[in-house]
Image: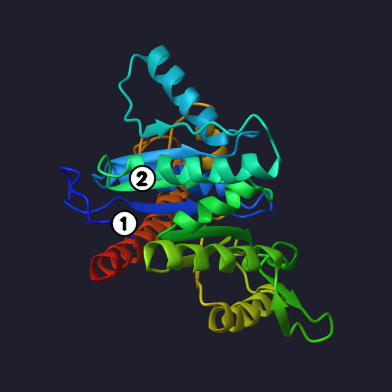
Amino acid sequence: MYETVSNGLNNQRARCIVVGNEKGGSGKSTTVINLIFGLMDSGHNVICVDLDFRQRTLSRFLECRTAYGEVTDQTLDMPDLRRFSPSALGAVATARGAELSRFDTFMKGLQGNADYIVIDTPGNDTVLGAHAHSHADVLVTPINDSFIDLDVIARLSPLDMHVTGPGHYTESVWEQRIVKQARDKCDTDWIVLRNRLGALESNNKRSMDTVMKELVKRFGFKALPGFGERVIFRELFLKGLTLFDVAASDGDNRRTMSHVAAKHEVRKLLGAVTTAATASGQNHVAA
């Protein structure tokens, strides 16, 4: 079990937030970036870890942010990016075991330096990415609001959409929660974020609502509305900027409305995540 560590900031261990989903295109990068900078905007010190060694979207975003700040002569707030080097031996079983042990040591070394640790995991199945889930106090899983994306969470009957069992990602999450319970003596709070929710009622949306209610009861996660399909997220990426860098008055009326709505979506997610993380911290202390 982790001990309560004084970091000179809040006298508690850093809460670990993992953003994960083995299916790409679900808004994982948008989620992790806005979580990091939303926490920073709220006054928290944040360490971020990019385990998506192939795509490196988070790392690329921070590189764009640094470059934009230099070109525009601005001082932009940055999180503390820490790098973990993967094993050069690849899939050799002994190398995998050593790599996971190194990662556990790496994570312990981050304690005492921040309020939150945010980990971006790859959008595919990797041993290290799965193991990182075992360090999550809060796991955030973005999915598109469709039955295609829901397949990684649950198996459904094609006749009546009854839940017949967990999907492969849910099984992986359960396995890593067992690892966490054995090591840290507490559980992970799991949030499934429904991105790209349609504004209008439709048969698909109603069916998704019905299935999600059953999944919440059976699989023990919280389902939250996430981010809409908004151009502003894509526009800001190349500059390395977020909603928290842009004043709501910038741009025309259409962009202003999109900005306000998007920021509201981020604030709702932040509220849910920080509430869950606070509860997790209390569980650690109690344990």
Seen at 42% across and 61% down, the residue is: 183
- Which mark is drawn over residue 223? none
State the residue position of label 2: 108
Residue extending farthest to the front is 94
User: Residue sitting at 69 percent across and 67 percent down?
Assistant: 150
| Left or right: where 160 falls relative to 85 | right
Q: Position of residue 14 (x, y in %)?
A: 30, 50
Above or below, 240 relative to 243: above
Quickly name the residue at label 1: 2
> Which of the 4 quarters of the picture holds residue 34?
top left
The amino acid marked with disc number 2 is Lys
Position of residue 68 in the picture relative to residue 93 (left or right): left
Q: CA distance from mark 2 to mark 1?
A: 8 Å
**Image color mode:** rainbow
* Outermost residue to the right: 159
189 and 251: which is toward the camera = 189
In the structure shown, which secondary structural element does the residue marked by tag 2 occupy? Answer: helix
Q: Are marks 2 and 1 in contact (CB under 8 Å)?
A: yes
x then y, percent, for residue 189 = 43, 67
